[in-house]
Amino acid sequence: MATSGIPATRLKKGDLILLEGQEEEIFKIKTVSTSAPGKHGHAKVRIMYENIFTGSGGEVTYSGHKEIEKPIIEKEKGQVLSVTPKIVSNDPKVPVVPAVVQLMNLETFETYDLQVPAEMDENLMQSGTELEVRVYMSKKWIERIAPTG
């Protein structure tokens, strides 16, 4: 598993981290607050986080000198082959089916399907559009549309 350690006091908003016992999941830091060290103790770091795949979140508190694992994430570019649009039902009991794109890795020519993140507009993705994809272990996700030029 490709990770690096960083002291909890050096974490900042937007960093990606791994939590103990949940090494397959990646969490994005929403907020970090550090308390001053006391007379007999170390500084404490309170982290509010969100799972980048499910959107669920929580908070955790660590001693300031604790080493937190950060994933080493690889980057790759993919080209959109096809887009399956999001399906929204008029029935509130039926969940929304997110949009899915079929991508081809521009180096290995491997093809795979990825879910379009909720904050991205699938209408901007057409056949031939290049996307920046992030990879950690067996997980892949779309980071953004690759800049042109």
Image (cartoon, grey):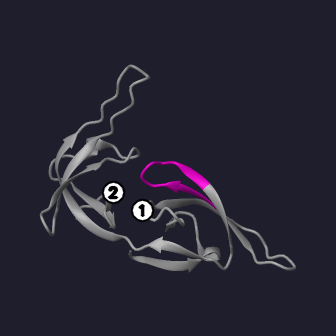
Above or below, 33 relative to 37? above
- Rendered residue at 33%/39% (across/down): 98
Q: Residue at x 25, y 36 (%)?
A: 85
Residue at image point 47% right, 79% down: 4
Q: Quadrant of residue 36?
A: bottom right
Q: Residue furthest top?
A: 91
Task: Residue type at mark 2: give it.
Answer: Trp
Q: Position of residue 61 (x, y in %)?
A: 68, 64
Quadrant for residue 121, please give it.
top left
Position of the N terminus, as image quadrant, is bottom left
Determine whether label 1 and label 2 are within 8 Å by CB.
Answer: no
Q: What residue is drawn where x is 30% and y is 35%?
A: 86
Q: What residue did someone put label 2 on? A: 141
Q: Is residue 148 left or right of residue 120?
A: left
Please give the residue where the numbered disc 1 appears in the rendered image: 24
Mark 1, secondary structure of its residue: loop
Location of residue 35 (image quadrant): bottom right
Label 1, residues with CA under 10 Å away: few <14, some 14-19, many ≥20: few
What numbered label is drawn on residue 73? none
Please tell me which residue lies in front, 22 or 51. 22
Horizontal and vertical percent for residue 81? 14, 50
Please, what is the three-letter code of the amino acid marked with disc 1?
A: Glu
Q: Secondary structure at mark 2?
A: strand
Residue range in magenta is 47-58
Q: Name which of mark 1 and mark 2 comes first in the sequence.
A: 1
Question: From the image, which quarter does the C terminus lie in?
Answer: bottom left
